[in-house]
Image: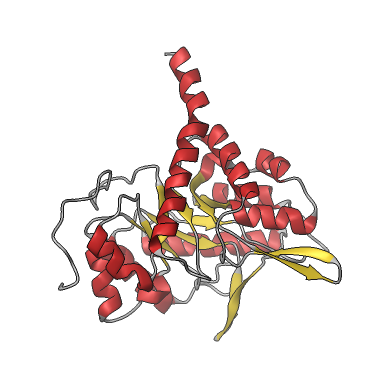
Amino acid sequence: MNDRVAASAPAGASEPNRPPPNRAGVGLKSEHYRTILETRPDIGWFEVHPENYMLEGGPPLRYLEAIRADYPLSLHGVGMSLGSCEAPPRDHLDRLKALVERFEPFLVSEHLSWSRIGDRFLADLLPVPLTREALGVMADNVARAQDHLGRRMLIENPSTYLRFEHEEIPEPEFLAELARRTGCGLLLDLNNLFVCASNHGFDPLAWLDAFALGAVGEIHLAGHAVDDADGHVIRVDDHGSPVGEEVWALYREVIARRGAIPTLIERDANLPPFDALLEEARHADRVAREASEPRAEVAAGYA
């Protein structure tokens, strides 16, 4: 490919067929393809939405192949609608499986959400009611998807703005039971957690106390917008700004409890130059190292 430059592999990069480092990565955007290939930045990995690459060919796939040659990839789906009453569409699963087999991502993830009724697709990741019936539907669909892909998936906690009147299961317990029933892992989005805690008035640390941290295979960090709804502050998960300090504080807490884990800097709106995202990823690496030190010291004391 003509856009690829000859250079040595970036320091710390993993071979595509090896386990990824417990480092930070960023979402891969088309605006940054050339910068990445020309500069070969020292970064842990890249995440892509597979729906953007379900193509027969063309430049996006060629760029992705070139970047995949040097960096691990994660596939983070937005179109499977695992919370819908219907099973995930077979053609969608087939196309996703083709990408998984072609690019061998180290992680495949989706959302605790729904976005489809029959052949009608909605543009939003809508919340799943936290009921026993919804848990059964979600578990069946996650199991179907994992069986089809031949891969364990991670399921992400959502951002929400309204609460269902007849919730039966607290969200941390709902996700833990989903993981228990299906063997799936969990993707812990700390910005989503902070947004929900602020919007609904609960303690995010108490939520973490009840959450199955041992099942977490990835963390997402992002920024959010603050809006006013008739005098009431609403936080909106828009991925349009740098990670806020409240979310960094939650990240320190989780790493202190759980240890270092692959972490994504998510940015989908108001996209900055790549160097700004790279610096946020490096900051996440520094925070993870610092937060992990007490755990390492305790472990060394019992060696």
213 relative position to 68: left or right: right
Residue 106 appears at what percent x and percent y?
35, 53
Find residue 259 and report its horizontal and vertical position in percent. 49, 35
The quadrant in which residue 148 appears is: bottom left
Q: Is residue 162 above or below residue 7?
A: below
The answer, for residue 125, to whether it is visible in the render is yes
Is residue 233 or residue 299 the one in the foreground?
Answer: 233
**In this image, 124 relative to 72: left or right?**
right
Residue drawn 62% across and 42% down?
249
Point out residue 191 in the picture as x, y percentages from the top left corner.
61, 55
Q: Residue at x 47, y 77 (%)?
A: 89
Vertical arrangement, residue 274 with respect to residue 8, above or below: below
How is colour applied across the structure in the image?
Answer: secondary structure
* The N terminus - image quarter: bottom left
The one nearer the camera, 277 or 28, is 277
Q: Which of 158/9 is in front?
A: 9
Q: Quadrant of residue 132?
A: bottom right
| Quadrant containing the C terminus in the rendered view | top left
Please name the residue shown 40% across and 45% down the image.
23
Give the image location of residue 294, x and y in percent.
52, 24
Asked whether the viewer can see residue 163, the reply is no
Report the number of discs: 0
Q: Nearer the viewer, residue 142 or 280?
A: 280
Q: Residue at x 57, y 43 (%)?
A: 251
Considering every residue shown, the one lying at the far right of the view is 231
